[in-house]
Image (cartoon, helix red, strand yellow):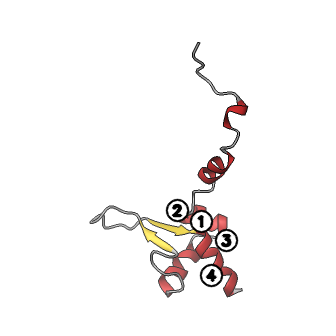
Amino acid sequence: MMTLWAKSNDYQGFEHLVGKVRSNRVWLEPKAAAVQLGLTSSRALHEFRKSGKFRPKTHFRNIAKPGAGVPRWQYNIPNCRTLLEKQI
């Protein structure tokens, strides 16, 4: 007989994979990144990016399709958090 659902103990030993999937959201859109970093608005991220404090491909990236004209920024939460902690 085939079971179409998994029992809770079927996943024993795979906790490390489940944890990795849940914490895999390293790059976030500006509003979500601002919340995660404890900033009052996403405008602060824009200012850090424009001033050169955040570096491309380390702290932020543009995920827009080539030639889109309008950038879609994402921010690397661990890298941004490390830099912001050094600034304080």
Of badges 3 and 2, nearer the viewer stands: 2
Find out whether the residues at labels 3 and 2 contact each other: C-beta distance under 8 Å: no
Q: Quadrant of the N terminus?
A: top right
- For marks 4 and 3, the one nearer the N-term is 3
Residue designated by label 1: 33
Find out whether the residues at labels 4 and 3 contact each other: C-beta distance under 8 Å: no
| Percent x, y of residue 39 | 66, 72
Point 57% across, 16% down: residue: 2
Question: How far apart are the two marked residues, 2 and 1, measured between alpha carbons?
Answer: 6 Å
Of badges 1 and 4, nearer the viewer stands: 4
Residue designated by label 3: 40
Question: How far apart are the two marked residues, 1 and 4, measured between alpha carbons?
Answer: 14 Å
Find out whether the residues at labels 1 and 4 contact each other: C-beta distance under 8 Å: no
Dot 1 falls on a residue whose secondary structure is helix
Residue designated by label 2: 29
| Percent x, y of residue 60 | 49, 73
**Mark 2 is on which residue type?**
Glu
Question: How far apart are the two marked residues, 3 and 2, measured between alpha carbons?
Answer: 15 Å
**Mark 3 is on which residue type?**
Thr
Instruction: Specify whether 67 is left or right of 82.
Output: left
Of badges 4 and 3, nearer the viewer stands: 4
**Mark 4 is on which residue type?**
Leu
Looking at the picture, tell me which residue is in the foreground, 73 or 43. Answer: 73
Point 45% across, 78% down: residue: 56
Point 31% across, 67% down: residue: 69
Residue designated by label 4: 83
- For marks 3 and 1, the one nearer the N-term is 1
Find out whether the residues at labels 2 and 4 contact each other: C-beta distance under 8 Å: no
Q: Tell me: residue 11, above or below residue 87.
A: above
Q: In terms of image quadrants, where is residue 45?
A: bottom right
